[in-house]
Image (cartoon, rainbow, N blue to C red):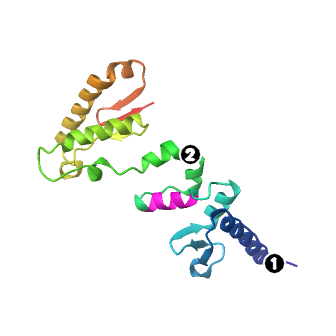
Amino acid sequence: MITPKRAFINVVNTYIAAMEKMTDYDLEYWVADDIGGVAVFADFYFFSFDDIRLFVDHKREADDIFRWHECTAEHGAFMNYSTWIMGDFNKQTALKFKPKPETAIIKNGRKVGNSTRQIDQYIQDLFDGLPVIVKDHARGGNIKKNNEVLFGRLMSRLAREHNLDRLMDDRLIQIDTNNYELKLR
């Protein structure tokens, strides 16, 4: 008679073999020798058995689980693999992990175009379907008056260049003036 533990290990080995075949990466080891816990591939990629099972069961593209691992690790954000595969990775999910304007485009000094670049990035994010929370680059966005001014400049640009009135009339944009947030519907 096969014990439950032996049956589980057989199932785990079946999934590992499938993942190795699908990705061309071999299992390096199980963390703490806990079979069915966290597996390590290529000495860099750490996946729970549940992640591996989802990858195999959903017949994902060979690099999908590695892109998820790199995306979450690189941007210090966490999204479980289940959420990753259920969403529209190519458009919505990947965009959510773009570097924030505060770190991506800010230069040292005053009057060097930081606010303009921030507004450009906020408009791009908005039309990419991402929610936008406006925070001025100065002092990490902790000065309410600066945030208010930047929000006003963003709203002016939207009115001037993107027909904000039509977006509002058609209820295509959601605006929270108290928290300086914008979102297209």
Of all residues shown, which one is farthest toward the right? 1
Crowd around label 2: few <14 · some 14–19 · many ≥20 (10 Å): few
Q: Earlier in the sequence, mark 1 or mark 2?
A: 1
**Region of the chain picked out in magenta, as a range:** 65-73
Q: Are marks 1 and 2 in contact (CB under 8 Å)?
A: no
**Per the image, is 45 magenta?**
no
Measure the alpha-carbon separation of dots 1 and 2: 38 Å
Of all residues shown, which one is farthest toward the front? 24
Which quadrant: the C terminus? top left
Give SS at disc 1: loop
- Residue 89 location, x and y as percent? 53, 47
Give SS at disc 2: loop
Work out whether 11 lies above or below 155.
below
Left/right placement of residue 169 relative to residue 66 reads left
- Residue 160 location, x and y as percent? 26, 23
Amino acid bearing label 2: Gly
Q: Magenta segment, principal secondary structure? A: helix
Work out whether 70 lies above or below 46.
above
Residue 55, quarter of the rendered image: bottom right
**Can residue 144 be spotted in the picture?**
no
- Pointer 1: what residue? 3
Q: Residue at x 40, y 58 (%)?
A: 75
Nearest to the observer: residue 22 or residue 167: 22
Left/right placement of residue 161 relative to residue 67 reads left
Residue 23, quarter of the rendered image: bottom right
**Can residue 134 be spotted in the picture?**
yes
Q: Residue at x 54, y 57 (%)?
A: 80
**Per the image, is 67 magenta?**
yes
